[in-house]
Each structure stands twice: as C-alpha cells, then as structure tokens.
Image (cartoon, grey):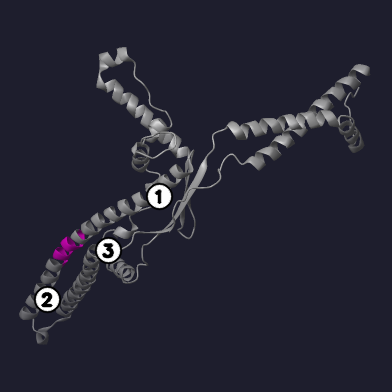
Amino acid sequence: MNNSILYTFHDIYLIIRNNLSFVSKISLLCLALGIAYTLFTTKYYESYISIYPANEPGGMSNNIMGVSSVLGLDLGQSPNSAFHIPDVINSIRLKRDIVNNKWNSKKFNNKVNLIEYWDLKVESEGFLNSIFGNDEENDYGRIAEQNAILKLENNLYVFEEESGLIKIRVLMEEAQLASDISNYISNFLVQYIGTELKLKSTQYRQFLENRLVEVEQQLKSAESDLTSFRNSNPIAKDTPSLQNLRGQLTRNLEVEQQVYLTLRTQYEIARADELKEQPVLNILDVGFPSMNPYWPKNLLIYVISLFVGFMVSIMILFSMDILSKKSSG
C-alpha cells in the first residue's frame, strides 16, 4: 500500500495562503536573527593594493642568453628572474614582521603588535615559570606568535593575474589598520626585493667576472695552439691530415673568440645593472581606509535570512499537514 502524499502547486499555494501569518512570523524571526548577527558580529574592513613587476623586457640581455645557450656557455641565472612576488608575500618572514610590528589602533592608547591587538598572548603559570624560567615563557611567546600568523593568513589574500598584475587584499577590524598593513606590505616588497636584487646583481657580476677570467685563459690557449701549429707547419707543406688539424684549431679559436665576446658583453651589462638604480615594483594602487565594512554584507544576510525563514516555515507547515493527514487517515 502506497502511503505517500502528493501535493499540487494549488495545494502548496493554499497551505501558504491559509498560514500566511505563521510564514510571516517565522520569516521575520529569521530576519531579526540576521539583523542581530550584523549588529554584533565582528566587522572587517578591506584595504587592497595592486602592484606590477617593473622588470624590463630582456632585450639585448635575452639575445645574449640565446647566443650563449647555442655556444654551450653557462652565464648563470639573471637576477631579474629570481623572484616570485606572491611567494615573498606569503613568506613567514613577512607575516612575522607584520605580527610583531607596532600598529596604531583605536582600541589602545599606545601602539600594539597584532598579538596584543587580538589578545592572543598566552600567560605562563607562575609555578611552572619559576621551575623552567625563561624557556617556558619563550615557548608561550612562540605559540602566541604562531596563532597570530595563522589569524593573519586568514585575513590576507593574494591574487596573481595572467598579465602579471598582483592584487593584495587585507581584512582587519579597523579600516585604518587594514590600510596601514597593506601599505606596509608594499613598502616591504620594494625594500626587500630592491636589496636582494642589488645583492644578486653583485653576485652575478662576480660570477661573470670569474667566468671571464677562465674563458680568457682558454682563448689565449687556443691562440697559442694555433700559432705554434702555424710556426711548425707552413701551409706549403700541408698534408690532408695537417689541413684537417689546422682547420680544427682555427675553428676552436673562432669559437673561443665568440664565447669571449659574448661573455664580455654580458659582463658589461651586468656591471651597468649593478650600478644603476632601477625600480623593482610599480605600485599601481596604494591602500586606503575603507568607509564601509567589507563584512558583514548586510543586504545579502537580510535576503538570506528571509529566504531561510520562508523555507523553514514551509517545511514546518508541510510536516504538520502530513502528520495531520496520516493521523486522520
């Protein structure tokens, strides 16, 4: 025997119409809960920056790299290709700096770090501290720092577009604090990458300088071999085997000359790059304090609350109607 109960659209309409007051009350109750949530939940403000790598197209340097690969010459890695900016942003070093930096806040009279701001400091027990001393206090400090870093990770978003544009969004409980942290990140990137590029440029120039000395010795050796061969074997007395050897020594010298010229050119470019001041990042958008909270999104929450209230009331009405029909049947 089939005990299932089927409802037509007309049945549904009648149930809702006959119980419109109940549906309205449940919907309004859920709306009130949604309003209460928006009033009492923690508000987050958004600040974002957008940056673009300022590396110039390779030009002559790329052409030289192509020639060097054909010649089998190792010129090392160019300093400009050594950084992936999202990795720097997501590094523990930067997050630790942000967490431990002192920030202005409306909640405190003095500048505080994020551990204090979020009240994540773990107090050590006096008895245990008297036994273990500063070691236990340091452990609690590291735990608090790790908790702050984890909380910061949930408030920090990095987006990299195909064009190379990088957007960084920071969410914090205060608009000015979110702005300060986002701009701190951009300043950190400019300083850190600029310093590292300078260091890598010096290291790259030194690497090329050492390679240049080696190649110069190889060039002198090739010149000496060909000169000695020519002095010992005049062209007039060449045999087929001597002709082959003369050609091989000549080709070796030509290759060494090309290698030397390529390396010398790249070395001069590296010297110029080391000396010149070049921008490492283009800051397209700086962080500004937001006027309105990013979260909660009041209108969205109100609409969802009304919809949930409506669906809950319908489920209750249908459950009651089904139970009524089964008991009467």
Q: Given contact means CB atoms under 8 Å apart, are the residues at marks 2 and 1 in contact? A: no
Q: Is residue 210 left or right of residue 276?
A: left
Looking at the rendered structure, the secondary structure element under dot 1 is helix
In the picture, the quarter occupied by the C terminus is top right
Cα separation between marks 2 and 3:
44 Å
Mark nearer the N terminus (2 vs 1):
1
Count residues near mark 3 (Cα–Cα under 10 Å), then give few for <14, some for 14-19, many for 20+: few
Q: Which mark is residue 183?
A: 1
Few, some or many residues within 10 Å of mark 2 (<14, 14–19, 20+): many
Q: Mark 3 belongs to which amino acid?
A: Glu
Task: Report the front residue among 40 and 224.
Answer: 40
Say which of 128 and 101 sits in front.
101
Q: CA distance from mark 1 to mark 3?
A: 22 Å
Along the horizontal axis of the image, is 235 left or right of 108? Answer: left
Q: Reading the chain from its start, which is encountered first: label 1 or label 3?
A: 1
Which numbered circle lies on residue 53?
none
Q: What residue span does the magenta drawing correspond to?
A: 207-215
Amino acid type at mark 1: Asn
Q: Is residue 26 visible?
A: yes
- The furthest residue to the top: 127
Residue at image point 14% right, 67% down: 218
Judging from the image, what secondary structure is the residue with disc 2 in?
Answer: helix
The secondary structure making up most of the magenta span is helix
Image spot of residue 315 (x, y percent): 79, 28
Q: Position of residue 320 (x, y in %)?
A: 84, 23
The residue wearing badge 2 is 226
Earlier in the chain: of badge 2 and badge 3, it is 2
User: Is residue 314 visible in this depiction of the protein?
Assistant: no
